[in-house]
Image (cartoon, rainbow, N blue to C red):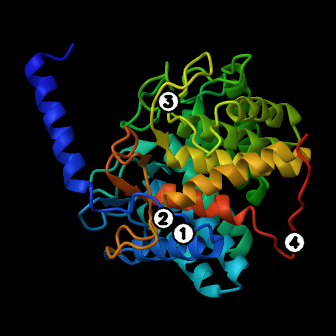
Amino acid sequence: MLNVKTLVLRTALDLWQRRRTAGLYTSGHANPDVQTHLAEARDWLCRAQDHGSDEGVSYGAILGEDFLPSYPETTGYIICTFLDLADYYADKAYLARAFAMGVWETRIQMDCGAVMGGMLNSHPTPAVFNTGMVLLGWAALLRTTGDERFRLAGERAGRWLLAMQEPNGQWIRGNSKFANARTTTYNVKAAWGLAEMAVALGNPSFLRAAERNAEFAVSRQTRNGWFRDCCLQDARRPLLHTIAYTMQGLIGIGRITGRNEFVDAAALTARSLLGLMSSDGYLPGKIDSEFQPAADWCCLTGTAQTSIVWSQLAALRGDACFAHAAERANRYLMARHDITNTNPAVRGGVLGSWPVHGAYGRFKVLNWATKFFLDALLIRQPTAHAPRVDLRCE
């Protein structure tokens, strides 16, 4: 229990932070132009990569301050977004950026094969989740470029993940020191990275390990779609962010293996989330076991991820209700996307929470929030390979 003095000090600090940041971000606007938002978010990620002396992408920025150091975990899956940008804009500059990110990741890979937890640091500790996120990027680059560095790095990372895995498919050993090691059902997204590398390498042992983790994740799902032990800190009230990671991982592995039960599990959660969304696209940042809101703020990262999942399910299942939900979520995100700020560390980036003092990524712009926002918008755009199809939601 907090004593009175500590509570008073925390309250005072929170009020001071709210006042300090009040004029440092746009409080909302009504510009719904998708191309404008794509360009601003894309350019923010480029600036985040260009900051500092390495090729990684900055973690983000505290409001009122400059970019933070590079973040290996999220740089790993931002690679995939830059490859998508290269295709979308037919611009090889984004491919060059993705390639540089991937090579940088190989240079800082730990001797054991793992990827470090936290921001770039001189005393790295291994992290299962982070390793899986970088595998997503390395696998995509290996398929795109065939570069031997990505094959070797992927093999080393995959072997380390297998060595850390429990017989039931779970990962307890090797989890990040920044998270509760026993509440990591969301590691199934890391397993998706292992599955993607399995395909890129033609390695059936990697693929089976990913399947075992997906089976474990499904075993943690309740009848209403909620997942047990699925949060960075509070397993009783998990973040929408980590719930969405779990859906993304299950869909990814389900599509690779053809095991529809994994996609079905993600769809169950995604459908329950439809009932929590407000008419303006708001989703609560935390959700309890009864699938009721457990926070009065929005996790913008989780909303963007959920939008991606809804778009994927709309395409996989032909269900327009998911497509319309994704559009509504995207409008909510765009209305809170700062595209006019004079601060280059803020303009075009996506905040952790809305309001900005919400408990996830408080007072920060985050690179992964921006990445998922870009992905959520890109997946809704028609391309030569996937023209947009409007369905009727009954």
Write down the residue under mark 2: 105
- Label 4 belongs to which residue? 385
Q: Relative to the observer, which residue lies in front, 304 or 92?
A: 304
Q: Check whether the beta carbons of the residues at disc 3 and disc 2 lie within 8 A of each other.
A: no
Q: Are marks 1 and 2 in contact (CB under 8 Å)?
A: yes
Front in this rendered view, residue 290 or 55: 290
Q: Secondary structure at mark 1?
A: helix
Is 298 situated left or right of 361 in this image? right
Distance (Cα) linking label 1 and label 2: 5 Å
Q: Secondary structure at mark 2?
A: helix
Name the residue at 59% across, 29% down: 185
User: What is the CA distance from the residue labelled 1 to the residue labelled 3?
Assistant: 28 Å
Residue 249's x, y, as percent? 68, 42
Sequence-first disc among 1 and 3: 1
- The amino acid beneath tag 4 is His
Q: Secondary structure at mark 4?
A: loop
User: Type of residue at label 2?
Assistant: Glu
From the viewer's perspective, is the residue at label 3 or at label 2 nearer?
3
Cα separation, mark 2 vs mark 4, equals 30 Å
Q: Earlier in the sequence, mark 3 or mark 2?
A: 2
In this rendering, is residue 370 above or below 261? below
Give the residue type at disc 1. Answer: Gly
Q: What mark, if any, has residue 102 been given in the picture?
A: 1
From the image, state whether disc 1 or disc 3 is nearer to you: 3
